[in-house]
Image (cartoon, helix red, strand yellow):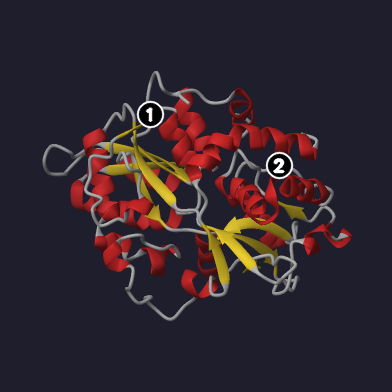
Amino acid sequence: MRTSPTRLSRVLTRTALLVVTATAVAATAACGGTGSGGSGGQTVTVYSADGLDAWYKTQFDKFRAETGIAVDVVAAGSGEVVNRLEKEQSNPQADVVVTLPPFIQKADAAGLLQPLGVDTSAYPATEKDPDGRFVSLAGNYLNFIANNSVDASKLTWDDLLKPEYLGKIQYSTPGQAGDGTAVLILLQQLRGKDGALDYLKRLQVNNVGPSASTGKLQPKVDKGELLIANGDVQMNMESITSKGSEFGIFFPASADGARHTVALPYSMGLAKGAPHAEAAKKLMDYLLSKEVQQTLGPDAFAVSARTDLAAAPAAGSGPTPAALLQGVQVVRPDWTKVLADLNGDVAAYEKAIGG
């Protein structure tokens, strides 16, 4: 699988990237270069799935102060991150790639990554590529959000089909966004492939339309333009806490009352042909360090996969991902199998909803 499937490439091109300018401004200001070891003045470019923006800014500012290496971030939907890498193969621009499954696996299968070249011994085998091309940067999970005018505590999947939600539901598009793809994968796990398509076909009556980026749905739910959307724990908890967003997090229940989610780690890789590979490795080493990883919970509402932090108590007294996930069953798909089926599954999905 060295080239992107035609259909998937076509849908991935529909969205434009969002440039996170907070770190870009710092990058241009830092080009005088005071770093050691000849690294001063360099700028590492990170292509990332959106959601970690605030944590990135804090950590990248610290990294620049320590090394003299600035960081530019380009954030977008998970699929678009890989799509841009594909289009730039003849003239690589990205150094570090951060995206959700199965898109990190897609980037690897397409030959867009190279061996990390950093120490990942503190990370279990389940959280990294066996060939050393990517590793979990921040643990995350699929969820849904509801405007505070909605009592979402007992909402079921079938409730989302009700006429009262006509034009008030939107979820990010499978094949374009990692969270949107996770919606399809979770429904396949719960209802089988045919059952998932049947459900999404019925949900389409209430669905506003496609969205390449899950992050763009948050402000719509906050303002009440939408009542319900999909999201992920890290991004949504950060928005509620730091921005005071007027929505709550929930996990739709099945008919038997069970609630489920999909593990969606932000995975990090080194782009093939990275213009600043050595500086990028320094950045990745920094981000994977115990000191930085232990800030994920309190500062980013994410979970570290480091084995030496697995039993660490939660910092602070605020909400935590672990508390939010109590009573929720976590599904951990075989992402290699998901990727192998993705082209056909996306095509079947588009046909089912009339795309």
List the single residue furthest toward the top. Answer: 90
| Label 1 crowd bin: few (<14), some (14–19), many (20+), radius 10 Å | many
Can residue 231 be seen?
yes
The three-letter code of the residue at mark 1 reads Gln
x and y percent of residue 220 in the render?
69, 55
- The relative height of residue 243 versus residue 38 in the rendered view (above or below) is below
x and y percent of residue 65 in the render?
23, 52
Q: Which residue is mark 1?
A: 93
Say whether residue 231 is left or right of residue 123. right
Q: Residue at x 40, y 70 (%)?
A: 298
Identify the disc placed on residue 210.
Answer: 2
Viewer-proximal residue among 224 and 330: 330
Viewer-proximal residue among 137 and 91: 137
Can residue 18 be seen?
no
x and y percent of residue 52 in the render?
45, 54
- The relative height of residue 120 versus residue 243 in the rendered view (above or below) is above
Q: Residue at x 69, y 50 (%)?
A: 192
